[in-house]
Image: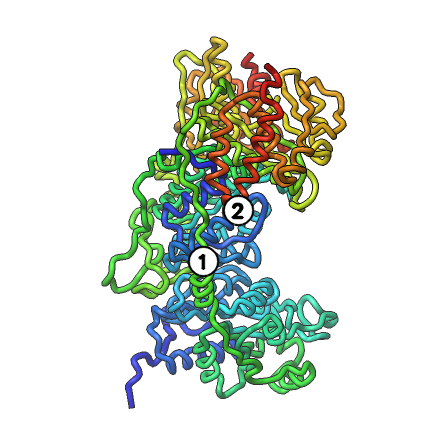
Amino acid sequence: MGYEFIEGNEGIARGAMKAGCNFYASYPITPASSILHYMNYFVPEAGGLVIQAEDEIASMGFCIGAAMAGRKVMTATSGPGISLYSENIGLAIMGETPMVIVNVQRQGPATGSATKGAEGDIQFTQWVTSGGLPIIALSPATVGEAYLLTYIAFNFAEKYRTPIFIMSNKELGVMQESVDLESINLPPRIDRKRVPPGRKEYLPHFFESLEEVPAIADFGGEYVARFTTSTHDKAAYLTTKPEIIQDMINHYIAKIMHNIDDLTLVKKDFQDGADTLIISYGIISRSAAVAIKATRSNGKKISSLVLQTLFPIPEKEIKSAMKGMRKIIVPEMNMGQYLVEIQRLASPGAEVVGINKMDTTLVSPKEIIEKGGLL
Amino acid sequence: MNEKKYTTYLTEKVGPLPFCPGCGHTTIINALDKALVKLQPEPKDVVIVTDIGCIGLSDRHFDTSGFHGLHGRSITYACGLKLARPELTVIAIKGDGACGIGGTHLLNVARRNIGITLIVANNFNYGMTGGQHSVTTPAEGLTSTTPWGNPEEPMDLCKTAIAAGASWVYRATSFDKDLPDVLASAIEQPGFAMLDILELCAAYYMKRNKFGKKELMALMDKYEYQHGLLVDKPRPEYSTRYREMYEKGKQVLKKKAPIEKQFDNSVKKQTGIIIAGSAGQKIRSTARLFAEGAIYAGLQCAQKDDYPITVQTGHSISEVIISPERIDYTGISSPDYFLLISDEGLKRAKAQIMALSENCDLYVDESIELPATNAKVHRLPFTKISEETSRLSVAFTAYGALLGDTNLFPVDAFSEAIKSDQSRDVADVSLRALYAGVKCTSGLSK
């Protein structure tokens, strides 16, 4: 029991190591670079390997290759790097590759402000690659959550054989805060389901029901393994048969959407009789917490829903929290990217208020109180 | 004579090789099969990695493991597989088109010497997408995108790889009788081995340019494309070298023990403290130790820094929040205390200083000319003190002045943080600077 004073990026690195990460590749980029620095020390100490790739495309390529050879892999970048990851993210989805991708968001578009925070990559992440299939993204608000959610991201990656996104932010990544990591309860560690020995052959995408996650055999293990970027059958051989292609697409969707309850992580702070709700995520959920405290101490009632899982959108939890609410406030460090989801889910009578800015500064509690009409 | 366990590594599972009649790809793939038969690896221990292009159809015709990835990126997947499992035989096969889009991977795998084999099926154009020109299309060559002749000069892939440091490079043609043996030799290299195989595209380049074996040979003469083994300079493979260098030079990142509360404090609410100075004044590390001191006194802390990307010049500003309770909002909209120790700090924070409220105490070096501000100003001889202690420790003096005046938490908590972090010699200087600061404000306000 005691406190460390560490930044969000270290929280992510420590969470990854706790989850058993043994391969890391990335390309330097502010404000994600220090994750590479930490991993450079941590991973070889644990017997693994870190490589600084020649670019973001190679970072992803190294990670996908290593993951399919049995490693637990992670890469980290910022928005500009996610742009370069995009095509390989599609490949990781296609090949059902377990991996963790960290985005320490910064002000964009383009180079934007490299050293300034933003959360402008939310919808970009939802639709990050061609094909438009669901992805899984978690958003930490504190250094402790950066540690916890990165650990959980590895569990999800292993369990669902797909890339998992950690949506951090410069404001969290390079901010140090006092945290007691030891006091954080971690769920049991999950490793990918592997094909038992002695089978005649390995089918890389074998499932009986669409939502079933196929057992994996590592490249270099007991079986001849296959991986392909092309539309394929369960044996990972190219196919052009529409019914097989559709089946595989349905499988990619089902393995995530069927398990949405398992993937949903939210923090609820509901007050009886409240008709106002703040829905927030990431670092801005901390501003919301201050605004809520101030509102309550003024004798007003207000509820809070904080989303740790951004995607798949926890619609059930959001709808249930919005039930009976007259006003829903959504503060974000972007111009309303999650707001559109809330507007879509809100009942017609409810007023949905977005508090949005992208001037590189945090949305403050004062702005939430004033623009949210909480005075 | 020993019976060979494997007489072929090709499979008919997905039908015969799909290439056009007369295409060099068929020759290359059959030669690779013969090379594997010669070497007799277990099929599960071999990965054929391909990407996009006609030659990218080849991995599935082998009974080995196969990995088919994005256009131009086969080298990256091959490297990932090899780095994860160095015992694997990893063979990447790509076309000349992929050497354009993925050129950087070719340079970097050669430079790093990751132990994969790279086979380039080089037929001077893009076959799969309709015969467009590639980085190896000869000048004046006719393609669908250079219908009046190619205005570009071709890239010599072998020379490129050699310039990047490749340890084994061989230029062949698909007409070479010894191609299986050469391929076997490439696969056996422990480091990176590249085999550039010049060949014919029956569908496009041959037809458009009346380009056959004779013309291919003439082209090699024209561009002085040397045939045969061009480089054979073995050096340690990347994974081996990585592990060796780590074992030799390894340093474990200094891990600080978690801090347990040892002191009390007088902080009643979330309190924001900003220090503004210059690069070289150890602003960030001193702010960090101040925060750790606060943790020794049972406080929660958060710190953010602002400095130019050219880290050794200009301003350096750190914001520290200390609080008896969990810190939610991590911005400081209205600082409670402001420490200003250099003109560069002022230059950056001028607007902020002018906006300080009357509730803020501003501790400023006496040499600095301040703009108008509502803050309570305390002019103090930070620089003068640092001339006697150490210029590098001026931030300690400023924090000392803050604690001497406010007693937010005991100075001893700060010195505990210093002593647990710095070597004894350095800590002695820091502590002298700190206590000199405390002395200069003790009893200032009260």
Looking at the rendering, which quadrant does residue B1 occupy?
Answer: bottom left
Which secondary structure lies at badge 2?
helix
In the image shown, does A179 or A307 lie closer to the viewer? A179
> Which residue lies at the image location 47% right of the left edge and 47% below the top edge?
A101
Residue A95 appears left or right of B55:
left
The residue shown at (65%, 36%) is B386
Q: Place residue B273 in its image quadrant.
A: top right
Report the front residue among A200 and A299.
A299
Residue B210 visible from this viewpoint: yes
The residue sitting at the left extreme is A198
Q: Which mark is residue B250?
A: 1
Q: Which residue does the image show at 32% across and 49% down from the upper left?
A: A191
Tag on residue B211?
Answer: none
The amino acid type, in three-letter code, at marker 2 is Ser
The answer to whether residue A130 is left or right of residue B312 is left
**Residue type for callout 1:** Lys
User: Pointer 2: residues within 10 angstroms few (<14), some, or many (20+)?
Assistant: many
Q: Is residue B248 above or below residue A251?
A: below
Q: Is residue A241 visible?
A: no
Q: Secondary structure at mark 1?
A: loop
Count of numbered circles in the view: 2
In this rendering, the answer to whether A16 lies above or below B244 is: above
Residue B376 picture location, percent across and down: 67, 18
